[in-house]
């Protein structure tokens, strides 16, 4: 990985992201938004949520990320990390709490309407179209745009050169790390205001993990906030501006990546000492 993972982020270079959101034509919202000035750029605030009629998985949980930051959610298996991400993206009903994006309360919006508002989400699994080529996958990412997306595709290829080399190959034939690059690239094709990644390094080798983290840092340096669930807690906290440790759906520890790495209790309980 790079020697300086923190570096000079938030440099206002919106070449991949778009501070004003997507193209001028967007799907009609299924819910209502409300002004919510102040606070972090994206926040899931005091969320209590679960699946269907089942029990609560999240309990008064708060996660947030600001412009140019990498915020990482870590914790033991079953802690509610991915559930927290899905709650922010609108994939399950929120029983209490709110989600706010760039000054708007978007709690009532569907996931597709949140994409139109500027949220890019990369799930852990089933995140590419395996029978389509790499380039077709990227083109699918631009489905909500009505402008010329060729420049964005060129920027994605600059970020992930291997994808340009394999652009005519079926995405299902790629390695695990290359598939993840396709998934992230497709999300970037929407020109997101914020990028959400659910365990982007799951199942990849340490070398590929380091490469993916370097690319994530590059995206953050363009000013796009990144909210990420990650199983490789120590490595993720090393690049994190902000970290959240969840235990049984609750906030157990919150701080900068460096603070959490230095916390004796966090190190003992979650980082192997």
Image (tube, rainbow, N blue to C red):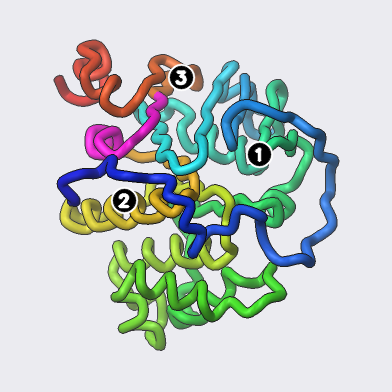
Give the class, few, some or many, for how many residues have Cα within 10 Å of label 3's Cα (few <14, many ≥20): some
Q: Can residue 55 be seen at all in this image of the molecule?
A: no
Which residue extends farthest top? Answer: 265
At a point 39% along the width and 50% down the height, the residue shown is 221
Question: Along the line of sight, which residue is nearer the eye, 244 or 91?
Answer: 244
Residue position marked by numbered label 2 in the rendering? 201
Position of residue 1 measured from the top left corner of the image (x, y, whole percent): 18, 51
Question: Along the line of sight, which residue is nearer the eye, 103 or 182?
Answer: 103
Q: Is residue 170 above or below residue 208?
A: below
Q: Are marks 3 and 2 in contact (CB under 8 Å)?
A: no
**Which circle's residue, 3 or 2, is located before the other in the chain?**
2
Position of residue 10 measured from the top left corner of the image (x, y, whole percent): 43, 46
At a point 74% along the width and 34% down the height, the residue shown is 105
Relative side of 46 to 11, left or right: right
Residue position marked by numbered label 3 in the rendering? 248
| Quarter that holds the C terminus | top left
Residue position marked by numbered label 1 in the rendering? 101
Q: Is residue 24 magenta?
A: no
Q: Considering the numbered disc 1 on the image, is that residue within a helix, a strand or a loop?
A: strand
């Amino acid at each position: 990985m790079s020697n300086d993972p923190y570096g000079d982020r938030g440099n206002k270079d919106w070449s991949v992201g778009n501070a004003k959101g997507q193209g001028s034509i967007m799907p009609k919202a299924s819910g209502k938004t409300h002004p919510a000035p102040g606070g972090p750029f994206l926040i899931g605030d005091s969320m209590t949520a679960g699946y269907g009629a089942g029990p609560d998985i999240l309990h008064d949980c708060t996660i947030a990320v600001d412009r140019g930051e990498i915020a990482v959610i870590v914790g033991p298996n079953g802690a509610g990390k991915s559930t927290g991400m899905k709650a922010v993206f609108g994939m399950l009903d929120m029983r209490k709490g709110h989600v706010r994006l760039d000054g708007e309360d978007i709690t009532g919006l569907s996931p597709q309407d949140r994409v139109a508002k500027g949220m890019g989400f990369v799930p852990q699994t089933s995140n590419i179209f395996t029978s389509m080529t790499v380039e077709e996958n990227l083109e699918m990412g631009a489905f909500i745009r009505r402008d010329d997306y060729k420049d964005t595709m060129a920027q994605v290829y600059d970020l992930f050169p291997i994808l340009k080399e394999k652009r005519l190959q079926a995405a299902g034939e790629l390695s695990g790390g290359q598939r993840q690059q396709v998934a992230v690239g497709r999300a970037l094709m929407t020109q997101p205001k914020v990028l959400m990644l659910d365990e982007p390094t799951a199942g990849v080798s340490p070398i590929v993990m380091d490469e993916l983290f370097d690319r994530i840092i590059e995206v953050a340096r363009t000013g796009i906030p990144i909210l990420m669930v990650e199983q490789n807690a120590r490595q993720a906290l090393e690049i994190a501006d902000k970290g959240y440790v969840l235990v049984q759906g609750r906030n157990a520890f919150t701080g900068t990546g460096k603070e959490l790495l230095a916390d004796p209790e966090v190190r003992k309980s979650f980082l192997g000492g």
